[in-house]
Image (cartoon, grey):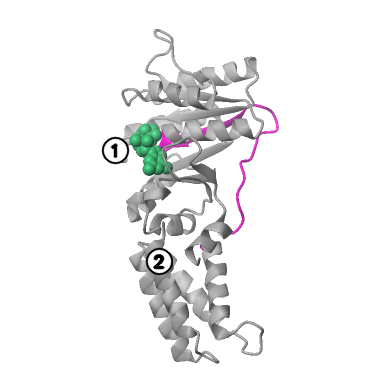
Amino acid sequence: MFENLSDRLTSVFTNLRSKGRLSESDINATAREIRVALLEADVALPVVKGFIENVKERARGVDVSKALNPAQQVVKIVNDELIEILGGETRRVRFAKTAPTVIMLAGLQGAGKTTLAGKLARWLKEEGHTPLLVACDLQRPNAVQQLQVMGERAGVPVFAPEPGNGVGDPVRVAQSSIIEAKRAQHDVVIIDTAGRLGIDTEMMQQAIDIRQSTQPDEVLFVVDAMVGQDAVNTAQAFMDGVGFDGVVLTKLDGDARGGAALSIRQITGRPIMFASTGEKLEDFDVFHPDRMAGRILD
Ligand code: GDP
């Protein structure tokens, strides 16, 4: 992940190492190199522009009398700005005052929602919660069964429509699951919803209906980081449609460039909350902007 960007930035900083002080042309040259590195990493143009402006402005204020040399100070500035575009602070799940907390997952088909549902359930269970997984993806063949497999692996029960009992109506399934969660004392409900291969009015309406009928505490937009700039476009469409509170980036293990990760927070204004890095249930973690920035500059 981020290999090319890391390498590019490292060479930018190496070039600065011999400088005793930074001239305006040093700053401009450095900014240009960082700009190219970010664009090559597939970071969205408006994000790159803002980033470069901030870096330039702060680099001009670099104080040569400080303990850190100019190159180190620029590294620090870039690190700070990376943390900023990645969201600054780690954003934790907001649990409801009265159980159950409802977490709804939304995203395109293949984004990794069902897998993520299982990972999130396992993680919540380890954190001491008693989650209930809810199968509301009634569109994709085998999605319910796939969630049941995930639930089994995570040791978390799955609420799924029984034949003849609201089959085909994800809104009813979602509503019933909350009643079931209260009855069986589950403190978190994780609703897996249907996606399509592309943005589609019917899919979006279904997500909106589930959202309205269950009033989730958190709507998480799940997106495949490997699709780069497309992730940002899809995020925008979901933002305008169902709306969401946080982002989950999946398949970061296969994302060599990192453009989606670096753009999505700024473009949507919503924090990245979790990252998924493989097909196993354990390949999942809370997203920490500072650690991610550290990895890029490692
Ligand atoms: P859904 O249609 O959004 O529910 O997507 P799925 O959960 O079925 O995931 C689609 C495919 O991506 C499956 O083959 C998953 O095993 C795979 N997948 C999900 N998350 C990750 C991840 O973080 N890394 C990798 N490499 N594969 C993943």
| Front in this rendered view, residue 237 or 45 | 45
**Quarter occupied by residue 130:** top right
Residue 284 pos. (x, y %): 50, 42
Q: Quadrant of residue 39?
A: bottom left
In the image, the segment drawn in magenta is 85-113
Q: Name the residue at 66% across, 27% down.
A: 99
Residue 102 within the segment the image draws in magenta = yes
User: How far from the left and from the top, in percent, is residue 42?
Assistant: 35, 62
Q: Which residue is mark 1?
A: 197
Which amino acid lies under the numbered mark 1 shown in the image of this protein?
Leu
Report the amino acid beneath label 2: Leu
Q: Rounded to the nearest whole Å, what is the CA distance between mark 2 and mark 1?
A: 29 Å
Please give the label number shown on residue 66: none
Residue beneath the point at 54% across and 31% down: 121
Query: Label 1 neighbourhood size at 10 Å, few (<14), some (14-19), many (20+)?
Result: few
**Which residue is the site of mark 2?**
5
Q: Is residue 113 left or right of residue 109?
A: right
Q: Quadrant of the N terminus?
A: bottom left
In this rendering, position of residue 121 left or right of residue 37: right
